[in-house]
């Protein structure tokens, strides 16, 4: 029988280089055309006092290095034109028409009026000689820091944006000391996939920017206890698609790079400001189902896509830990730490068949939520003899701050422990900060947790070997790990 061929990382990387990534020569031509437009547009706007040009910024996927080869439609490059408004009551709906006229003047008789098209929030310019398309988007600027300003839609709606913060957001993640070049190439592959999918399903709704945010989220938090594998494209794509299929895109995704976490995201039981319009809600649900449904024939397949029943586990009511956390430690940071704990738990499953893979995601989120708020002291996972309540193998993670922190790699666990007759077990203790809460506040904390624990006694570790020295941390907080194995 002929050997089966599989699409591996090498195959997808070669595909990206030849079919997805923008060739270097074309990228250089895009930049040249953008610079040409910027220089001429600056001169023309300076001659019209209705709006003052403050600055122009290259923006969009070309500036972020996530652009893909064009197959019709869309733009090749984006420019944000920051305009200072002299009149606060400006007719925003007419702004795009005004900008279109200015763009026509820039090119004079070298182009026809049909080469300038108004979209929802930009003026699109088609360059016939090269086939390039450039979108020029006006941004209303009032002197706020970090180039914050307002995009204006054709309907006159203002949308807050910042080109500088967009670029800083992705640079932080794609830099060589973070995810590296595989981060942006993974995004480009996903954008090419969704574009191809829309050819087969015209009703499929998925913005390319959504894919960028999903990759950013999974890079920060991991998925199912495993870090996003940006250097293994088949696995990384599987992780993204599994996340879409399993969550249905119903979980809140919040980034705190430039803004604090909204209070309503910290307590899920708070009411929403108001329900969406019925028609839009139906469209959103249908869009999620379409996007998630594309998972069924992609990749190797997740072992389980259905949401696991939340486990009910014993957890201690005793506590000794006390510490002061950095206010900059966010849920994103906590999920980074939790993802590494999840990677350890996946190794346990691979070695010993437990914990169940579809429960690891809940364990990870439980740790992240408690660690973020300073309510975690220790959490144990391992195998115990139920009759005697004695550990045979235990992984203990203790919440830690400051100088004792290390950020190591998951793994280095015992692979051949004799665990016949021992069952998987987890035990958690809360911090003094948790016990300082009122009874109602404690109940609120537990209500938000995906793992429902009951009061129990801590298993004992009678005689064995404890290995210490590893830990996982980020932004001044994390956990120290020790591994106990009974003799």
Image (tube, grey):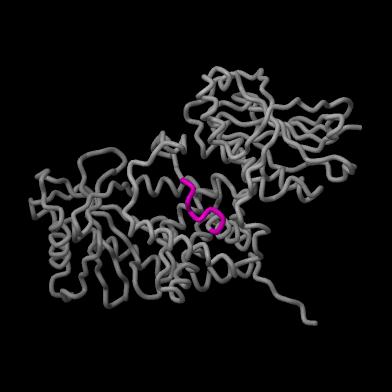
Residue 307 visible in image:
yes
> Does 375 appear above or below 15?
above
Q: How many marks?
A: 0
Q: Quadrant of residue 296?
A: bottom right
Residue 397 visible in image:
no
Identify the image quadrant of the C terminus: top right
Give the residue at the far right of this rendering: 487
Give the residue at the far bottom of this rendering: 1
Start and end of the magenta stretch? Answer: 245-252
> Does 4 appear above or below 255?
below
Task: Decide whether residue 265 is among the magenta residues.
Answer: no
Left or right: 482 as drawn, with respect to 405? right
**Depth order, front residue of 391/217:** 391
Q: Quadrant of residue 479?
A: top right
* Residue 320 percent across, percent down from the top left: 66, 17
Task: Name the chief secondary structure element in magenta.
Answer: loop
Q: Which residue sits at x=44%, y=73%?
A: 201
* Residue 41 percent across, percent down from the top left: 19, 59
**Depth order, front residue of 176/205:** 205
* Residue 431 percent across, percent down from the top left: 61, 22
Q: Which residue sits at x=14%, y=49%?
A: 52
Task: Decide whether residue 249 is among the magenta residues.
Answer: yes
Identify the image quadrant of the N terminus: bottom right
Left or right: 14 as drawn, with respect to 111? right
**Depth order, front residue of 194/141:** 194
Q: Which residue sits at x=81%, y=38%?
A: 383
* Residue 280 percent across, percent down from the top left: 34, 58
Left or right: 93 as drawn, with respect to 422? left
Q: Which residue sits at x=44%, y=67%?
A: 68
Left or right: 123 as drawn, with respect to 298? left
């Amino acid at each position: 029988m002929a050997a089966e061929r599989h699409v591996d990382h090498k195959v997808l990387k070669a595909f990206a280089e030849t079919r997805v990534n923008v060739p270097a020569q074309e990228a250089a031509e895009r930049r040249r055309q953008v610079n040409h437009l910027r220089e001429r547009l600056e001169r023309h706007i300076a001659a019209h006092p209705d709006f003052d040009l403050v600055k122009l910024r290259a923006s969009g996927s070309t500036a972020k290095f996530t652009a893909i080869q064009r197959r019709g439609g869309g733009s090749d490059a984006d420019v944000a034109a920051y305009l200072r408004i002299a009149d606060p009551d400006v007719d925003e709906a007419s702004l795009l028409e005004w900008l279109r006229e200015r763009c026509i003047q820039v090119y004079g008789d070298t182009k026809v009026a049909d080469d300038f098209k108004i979209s929802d929030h930009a003026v699109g310019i088609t360059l016939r000689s090269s086939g390039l398309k450039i979108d020029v988007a006006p941004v209303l600027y009032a002197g706020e820091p970090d180039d914050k300003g307002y995009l204006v839609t054709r309907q006159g709606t203002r949308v807050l944006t910042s080109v500088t913060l967009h670029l800083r957001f992705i640079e932080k993640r794609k830099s060589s000391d973070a995810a590296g070049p595989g981060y942006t190439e993974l995004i480009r592959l996903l954008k090419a996939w969704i574009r191809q999918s829309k050819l087969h399903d015209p009703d499929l709704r998925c913005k390319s920017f959504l894919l960028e945010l999903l990759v950013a989220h999974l890079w920060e938090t991991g998925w199912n206890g495993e870090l996003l594998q940006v250097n293994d494209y088949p696995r990384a794509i599987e992780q993204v698609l599994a996340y879409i299929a399993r969550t249905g895109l119903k979980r809140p995704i919040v980034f705190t790079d430039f803004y604090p976490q909204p209070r309503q995201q910290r307590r899920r039981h708070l009411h929403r400001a108001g329900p969406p319009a019925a028609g839009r809600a139906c469209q959103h649900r249908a869009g999620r189902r379409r996007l998630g449904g594309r998972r069924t024939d992609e990749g190797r397949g997740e072992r389980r896509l259905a949401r696991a029943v939340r486990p009910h586990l014993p957890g201690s009511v005793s506590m000794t830990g006390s510490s002061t956390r950095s206010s900059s430690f966010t849920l994103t940071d906590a999920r980074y730490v939790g993802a590494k704990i999840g990677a350890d738990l996946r190794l346990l499953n691979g070695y010993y068949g437990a914990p169940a893979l579809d429960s690891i995601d809940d364990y990870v989120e439980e740790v992240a939520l408690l660690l973020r708020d300073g309510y975690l002291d220790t959490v144990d996972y391992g195998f115990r003899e139920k009759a005697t309540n004695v550990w045979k193998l235990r992984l203990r993670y203790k919440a830690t701050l400051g100088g004792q922190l290390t950020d190591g790699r998951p793994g280095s666990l015992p692979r051949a422990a004799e665990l016949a007759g021992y069952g998987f077990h987890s035990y958690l203790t809360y911090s003094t900060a948790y016990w300082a809460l009122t009874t109602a506040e404690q109940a609120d904390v537990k209500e938000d947790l995906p793992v429902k624990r009951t009061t129990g006694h801590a298993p004992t570790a009678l005689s064995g070997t404890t290995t210490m020295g590893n830990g996982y941390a980020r932004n001044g907080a994390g956990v120290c790990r020790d591994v106990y194995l009974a003799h």
